Structure formats: C-alpha cells, structure tokens
Image (cartoon, grey):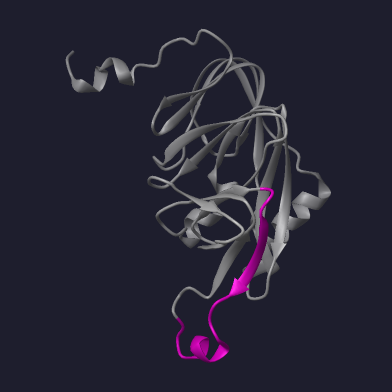
Amino acid sequence: MKSDLFASENLAEASAAPGMTLQNAKSVKYTVNGEVLARQGSMVAFRGNLQFERKGEGVGRMLRRAVTGEGLPLMSVRGQGEAWFAHRAGHCFVIEFEPGDALTVNGRNVLCFDPTLGYEIKMLKGAGMAGGGLFNSLFTGTGKLAVGCDGNPIVIPVTPQAPVSVDTDAVVGWSARLEAALHRSQSVGSMLRGGSGEAVQLKLSGEGFVIVRPSEATETAAAH
C-alpha cells in the first residue's frame, strides 16, 4: 500500500527514553514509566500497560468547578507505555520549567505535564466576569508542560513602560510574576446600546510576556 499518509514523519516510532516529546506540530507523545498527569479528554491513543484514573481535585477545587464550570479537570496515567495527547488539531508546544520558573496557563490549553510540576487553580476576580472571575492554573517547579493553541500563538512582551491588555477568551497564559487585573473598557451606556463585544480584558503589567491565540474561545470550546 502506497500513500503520503505513510511518510516517515507520520510514523510513531518507539521512544529511546521516558518523558514528553512532540509527535508532530499538533500532537504530543509521552513515554510513561510511572505517571503523567493530563487534562481529561486529551488522550487520543496509547499502547502498552497504562491505567487511566480521574484525578481527585480536593473539595475546594471541586466547589470552584461546580460554581464556575471552569478549572483543570485532570486524569492520572500510570504504568509503562506510550500515550498521545492532542485537542481539536490545535498546535502543540512543550515548555520546560527550570528552577524558579512559574507560568499561569488557561486550563483549556493544558494537555499534559510531568508530575514533578506543581499546579494550583487561581481565580482572578473582576466585575462583569461570568462566575465572578477568571480561573487559571499556576504551574511551578521543574519538569515539562505541554500546551495546545488554536492557530499560531502570539507571544507579546510586557514591560513596565508598556502593559498589555488581552481578551479573556483569547489568552493562553502569562508570566506568573506579572501583575494581572481584570478591567472593563466599555462604559455602561455603551453596553446598553449593544456594546463593542470587547467589554472585559485582562490587563498585565510588569516584566514578562503573555501568550495569546489568534481566535476567541467559543462557549462550547471553553467549557470542554
């Protein structure tokens, strides 16, 4: 059988060492020898002796999700084998954390990560936000994190002289050391007249960067 489908770049070959690598631009491969944590629903294939279990979130995190419908629903993948992760054919990136690194990521963009990374769900409060705020996951420690992005991401530097405001539906993540605040850019009168469709933004100040995707989340995609 002959086809470009079977080109060498599409072939899933056995890994030489445990851990996370890019299979291609739109999927991540994790060679498991112990455990990996992943967002529920992100696994697209696996082989070997692997067990998948829903990860307990603790009472506080479960209550937050019950109230807001957001957060980071996780599963634990344990055993020996290989698993592939992806989401809606989005572009995938592997981020390697070194000591002292910290990154805030929108939960919908998380694919999988090493269990050596710490994570905590944080809420950024602001008037006019559904559920009372914006929920994101703070990652710290050492290890690798795989994220997905609809389209090619835009990485915007943030400086004290040039703060950046981004649409809350388009933000992928930002440097955890940045000062983040939700603010309204529309007057009440403008909103009553129909508004611009850009009522609330995330304003980031300080020194670092913000990652934005070139599309806004739909209601269905954000909830998935």
Residue 217 in the magenta stretch? The answer is no
Quarter assignment of residue 9: top left
* Above or below: residue 59 compared with residue 167: above
- Given residues 104 and 224, the one toward you in this image is 104
The quarter of the rendered structure image containing the N terminus is top left
Quarter assignment of residue 103: top right
**Which residue lies at the image location 77% right of the left edge and 56% below the top edge?**
63
Count of number-bearing discs: 0
Residue 204 x, y percent position in the rendering: 61, 60
Question: Hey, which residue is sitting farthest right in the picture?
Answer: 59
- Residue 112 appears left or right of 102: left
Residue 180 x, y percent position in the rendering: 66, 60
* Above or below: residue 25 compared with residue 68: above
Residue 187 in the magenta stretch? The answer is yes
**Which residue lies at the image location 81% right of the left edge and 52% below the top edge?**
60
- Residue 46 appears left or right of 37: left
* Residue bounds of the magenta highlight: 176-195
Q: Is residue 23 visible?
A: yes
**Which residue lies at the image location 72% right of the left edge and 58% below the top edge?**
123
Question: Hey, which residue is sitting farthest top in the picture?
Answer: 16
- Residue 192 appears left or right of 12: right
- Given residues 4 and 207, the one toward you in this image is 207
* Above or below: residue 62 compared with residue 43: below
Residue 21 x, y percent position in the rendering: 50, 22
Residue 45 x, y percent position in the rendering: 47, 26
Quarter assignment of residue 88: top left
Question: Hey, which residue is sitting farthest left in the picture?
Answer: 2
- Given residues 122 and 203, the one toward you in this image is 203
